[in-house]
Image: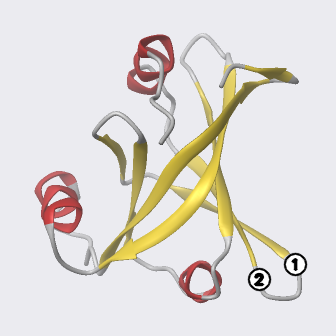
Amino acid sequence: MAVIPESILQAWEQRQVPVILTTVDANGMPNAIYASSVSHFGEDRLVVADNYFDKTRANIFTGSKGSILFMTKDRKTYQVKGTLHYHTEGEVFEAMKSWNPARFPGHAAAVLVVEEIYSGSEKLL
């Protein structure tokens, strides 16, 4: 388990919305989506609410790794990479339901377990 450094959590709190979530299908074809219902959970996970996933959900179910790209308000960019999990119940799912806007369905919580973090080409974790 990689712990997200405090400086990255601070940058995450200063992010612009939306972020970009990227997955890969079983044939290696990437899929990128904009996501606005996002948060972090614990010290090692970023969470995206599945409000309208289709290809993204299918890619997660095939075991896709993923990345989340975000930009801070001062235009510094970060890419967080890791393993994706899909939760339709439990602690992470309930946390997502608490911050996901009520107007969105919140079918599940897509969880990126952080393995690497970059800012540009600089590896931070």
CA distance for labels 1 and 2: 5 Å
Q: How many marks?
A: 2
Q: Is residue 101 left or right of residue 43?
A: left
Whether 67 is drawn above or below 63: the answer is: above
The image quadrant that residue 19 belongs to is top right
Label 1–label 2 contact, CB within 8 A? yes
Q: Secondary structure at mark 2?
A: loop
The image quadrant that residue 79 belongs to is top right
Residue name at image x 11 percent, y 56 percent? 98
The image quadrant that residue 43 belongs to is top left
Whether 71 is drawn above or below 95: the answer is: above
Whether 13 is drawn above or below 88: the answer is: above
Give amino acid for label 2.
Asp
Q: Residues within 10 Å of mark 2 (few under 14, many from 20)?
A: some
Query: Disc 2 designates what residue?
Result: 25
Q: Position of residue 73 (x, y in %)?
A: 54, 17
Whether 124 is drawn above or below 93: the answer is: above
Q: Secondary structure at mark 1?
A: loop
Q: Position of residue 21 (x, y in %)?
A: 62, 57
- Residue sitting nearer the eye, 106 or 112: 112
Residue name at image x 65 percent, y 82 percent? 59
Give amino acid for label 1.
Met
Outermost residue toward the front in this view: 1
- Residue sitting nearer the eye, 34 or 9: 9
Q: Position of residue 27 (x, y in %)?
A: 88, 87
Query: Disc 1 designates what residue?
Result: 29
